[in-house]
Amino acid sequence: MNNRSQNLGAIVSCAICAILVSIGVVRLLSYSLGPVGDVLRSSIVGFLCYDPDSLFSVQFFKLLATPTVVAGIYFFFRWRNSGRPTSPEAAQLRRAHRLDFESPLLRGVLTTLITLHWLAMEWWKFNTEGFYPWSPLESRWLNLGVLIASQALAFWSMKYLSFEPLNRDGA
């Protein structure tokens, strides 16, 4: 793969990740019952906000849950590994601390841990009063299915949405 296609892959990966992280931040802030949530719900990004009266909002928006967290992790490791190494030893150390987003084992472990986090939150949401907002439109079993689909989407996208810039030598 030539340098130009690697750069294009990095730009596309960063753009997709930036969109996902932005969606996740807006969604998280929209759960706020205070003025921040009200401002977001009445703004142009209101369609991204939590709406207890919308089946899509309460049930199927979870499809982006795991990919959004993976995008945040991707940005963290791009930031951590940014810049040029100053010595061969520094370059070797940087390569040793990079995550191989193309590894099926890493993708499986990472997406499973994130999904287990979401599943625990769903369990607490349905079993603990006042833990997290929920709507009568939600179904516990459909939430489970959507979160598993979210894991599958994240697992697939880690491989094919050009996460290779983390694996380049960068020397």
Image (cartoon, rainbow, N blue to C red):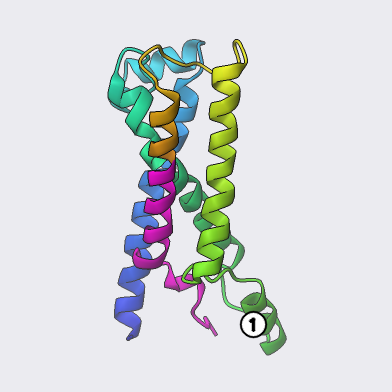
Q: Is residue 26 above or below residue 7?
A: above
* Residue for badge 1: 91
Q: Is residue 113 found left or right of 12 in the rendered image?
A: right
Q: Quadrant of the N terminus?
A: bottom left
What range is drawn magenta here?
148-171
Location of residue 102 in the rendering, given as x and y in whole percent from the top left corner: 46, 71
Residue in view at x 52 percent, y 44 percent: 115
Q: Is residue 166 magenta?
A: yes
The outermost residue toward the front is 141
Q: Is residue 147 magenta?
A: no
Location of residue 158 in the rendering, given as x and y in whole percent from the top left corner: 42, 61
Residue in view at x 57 percent, y 30 percent: 121
Q: Is residue 49 above or below residue 167?
A: above
Q: Nearer the viewer, residue 148 or 89?
A: 148
Question: Where on the picture, by quarter, is residue 59?
Answer: top left
Q: Residues within 10 Å of mark 1 (few under 14, many from 20)?
A: some
Q: Secondary structure at mark 1?
A: helix
The outermost residue toward the bottom is 88
Question: Where on the picture, by quarter, is residue 106?
Answer: bottom right
Q: Nearer the viewer, residue 107 or 84?
A: 107
Residue in view at x 36 percent, y 45 percent: 19
Q: Is residue 164 above or below residue 73?
A: below
Magenta span: predominant SS is: helix
Question: Where on the picture, by quarter, is residue 37?
Answer: top left
- The answer to whether residue 45 of the structure is visible from this angle is no
Q: Amino acid at mark 1?
A: Ala
Location of residue 42 in the rendering, given as x and y in whole percent from the top left corner: 32, 15
- The answer to whether residue 128 of the structure is visible from this angle is yes
